[in-house]
Amino acid sequence: MDLFPDYSAFPVWQPRMALPGPLRISVGLADDLRRWQAWWERHSRWGGGRSATVEQRQAWTVDGEVLARRLADETVAAVVYRWPFGPDGADPECPHCGHIARRMLRL
């Protein structure tokens, strides 16, 4: 299961967008995932491009890691958190990903 934002989508993918009901996740987690997605949409170039500080973007990235762990805990599934992207679209911390940005959380 992947966690990454995409315009106008719930941010969980299996490989297509997954919805909270079939995932059987808590209302609280579903709401938090929607809020996390909405923040990205407001601040992405596709959703309005509102400015955000480096610290705000870093906090959003960390929030995604926390949400990925919660998602893994509630679904008992491996979750791949697909953020942050480097300038070339790759995860700068991943030695295996090449052009695909992926951060595997070892849970």
Image: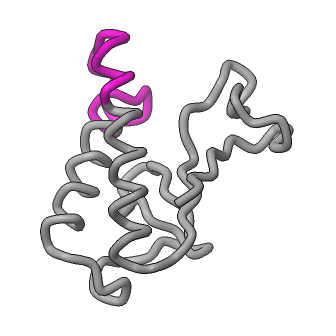
| Residue 50, above or below 65 | above
Residue drawn at x 42%, y 49% as measured from the top left = 7
**In the picture, residue 79 is in which quadrant?**
bottom right
User: Residue farthest to the top?
Assistant: 53
| Residue 2, above or below 53 | below
The colour scheme of the drawn protein is one colour
Residue drawn at x 41%, y 33% as measured from the top left = 61
Asked if residue 48 is among those painted magenta in the image, a careful observer would answer yes
User: Residue farthest to the front?
Assistant: 107
How many labels were placed on the picture? Answer: 0
Image quadrant in which the N terminus is located: bottom right
Residue 50, how many percent across, how many down?
A: 27, 20
Residue 14, how many percent across, how many down?
A: 57, 75
Asked if residue 46 is among those painted magenta in the image, a careful observer would answer yes
Residue drawn at x 85%, y 43% as measured from the top left = 96
In this rendering, position of residue 34 left or right of residue 101? left
The magenta region covers 41-59
In this rendering, position of residue 26 left or right of residue 12? left
**In the picture, residue 20 is in which quadrant?**
bottom left
Residue drawn at x 35%, y 89% as measured from the top left = 22
Residue 59, how many percent across, how many down?
A: 31, 26
| Nearer-the-camera pick, 97 or 8 | 97
| Residue 39, above or below 73 | above
